[in-house]
């Protein structure tokens, strides 16, 4: 594919310092579909792109999607349980449920993570007293930037089987890993290329190129990405500020010269923040 000329890049409208603004612009420019922020936005509500993705992975051209959402949060029923955020949650026309995740690092693609995602999805698929045999098929699909099993295969299907007989057992739960390093001259190779590509003009599959182009080159889409990163930056800044405050409070209290109230006065902590730190350090 040849790169088109004359595309006007739309910049972020958020008012930031020149240094931070330039860094933010470069961050958006350097994004590809292995960045879950961009990936979730490109596929959110995008039936055409999701249908293409699943048709390639399932090797079924007749497969169709009815619904897709990006960045879906599933909270644990346990107060202290782990919450997950799914990159893509889609439903096929036959009711099959798909969770597609992108993963840059091998640590995040641990096989037990697929088990956890599976359980969180399955727990939501049956209504009270509904028969277990009515449980819909589910697919947990990890598209990894690395070759998870290091066999240079484009895709890896993990199936259950009976050890003693070798017979496959189909309980409707499917796990698939896609090799993002694969570069064969087929749809899997093109898909891996597209997920690694930052430039929409060099992407093979039009629905993916159009999605990335929207969030990188249109004013609305690019502004949306910038706002997302600004919120992330603010969150990180708040967390770092809280860590610094914690360290300062700890140091003042360890000196033994000041009470908690005096330490809070020294650091000029007021309002709800004061209540939070007072409660935290009073324990």
Image (tube, grey):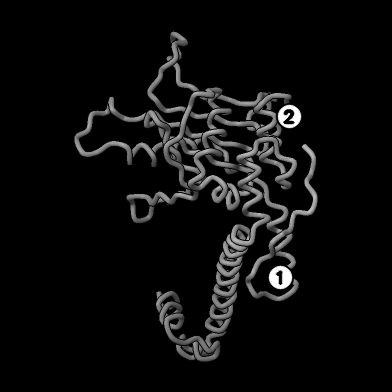
Q: Is residue 118 left or right of residue 208?
A: left
Which residue appears at 54% of the width and 48% of the height? 40
Instruction: Please state the total of marks drawn on the protein image.
Output: 2
Q: Is residue 119 left or right of residue 155?
A: left
The residue closer to the viewer here, 258 or 164, is 164
Is disc 2 placed on a helix, strand or loop? loop
Residue pushed farthest left? 129
Q: What distance separates the C-alpha of mark 2 from that of mark 1?
A: 36 Å
* Residue 188 locus on image (x, y percent): 65, 28
Q: Name the residue under label 2.
A: 183
Which callout, 2 or 1, points at the residue further toward the start of the chain?
1
Which residue appears at 50% of the width and 91% of the height? 265
Residue pushed farthest top? 165
Q: On screen, 197 above or below 168?
A: below
The residue closer to the viewer here, 126 or 247, is 126
Quadrant of the rendered structure where residue 182 is?
A: top right
Q: Name the residue under label 1.
A: 20
Which residue appears at 46% of the width and 27% of the height? 174
Is disc 1 placed on a helix, strand or loop? helix
* Residue 59 locus on image (x, y percent): 56, 23
Q: How crowded is mark 1: few (under 14 residues within 10 Å), some or many (20 or more)?
A: few
The residue closer to the viewer here, 183 or 161, is 183
């Amino acid at each position: 594919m040849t790169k088109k000329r004359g595309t006007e890049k739309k910049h972020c409208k958020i008012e930031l310092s020149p240094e931070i603004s330039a860094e933010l612009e470069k961050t958006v420019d350097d994004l590809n579909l292995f960045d879950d922020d961009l990936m979730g936005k490109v596929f959110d509500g995008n039936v055409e792109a999701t249908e293409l993705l699943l048709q390639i992975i399932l090797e079924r051209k007749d497969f169709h999607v009815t619904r897709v959402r990006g960045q879906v949060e599933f909270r644990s029923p346990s107060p202290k349980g782990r919450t997950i955020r799914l990159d893509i949650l889609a439903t096929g026309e036959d009711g099959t449920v798909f969770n597609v995740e992108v993963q840059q690092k091998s640590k995040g693609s641990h096989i037990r993570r697929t088990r956890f995602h599976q359980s969180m999805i399955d727990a939501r698929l049956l209504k009270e007293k509904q028969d277990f045999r009515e449980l819909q098929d589910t697919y947990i699909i990890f598209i990894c930037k690395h070759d998870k099993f290091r066999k240079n295969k484009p895709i890896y299907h993990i199936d259950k089987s009976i050890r003693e007989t070798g017979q496959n057992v189909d309980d409707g739960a499917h796990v698939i890993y896609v090799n993002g390093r694969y570069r064969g001259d087929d749809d899997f190779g093109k898909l891996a290329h597209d997920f690694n590509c930052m430039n929409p003009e060099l992407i093979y599959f039009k629905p993916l190129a159009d999605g990335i182009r929207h969030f990188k080159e249109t004013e609305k889409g690019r502004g949306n990405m910038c706002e997302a990163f600004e919120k992330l930056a603010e969150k990180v800044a708040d967390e770092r500020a809280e860590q610094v405050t914690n360290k300062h409070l700890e140091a003042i209290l360890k000196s033994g010269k000041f009470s908690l109230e005096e330490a809070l006065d020294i650091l000029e902590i007021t309002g709800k923040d004061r209540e939070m730190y007072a409660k935290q350090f009073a324990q």
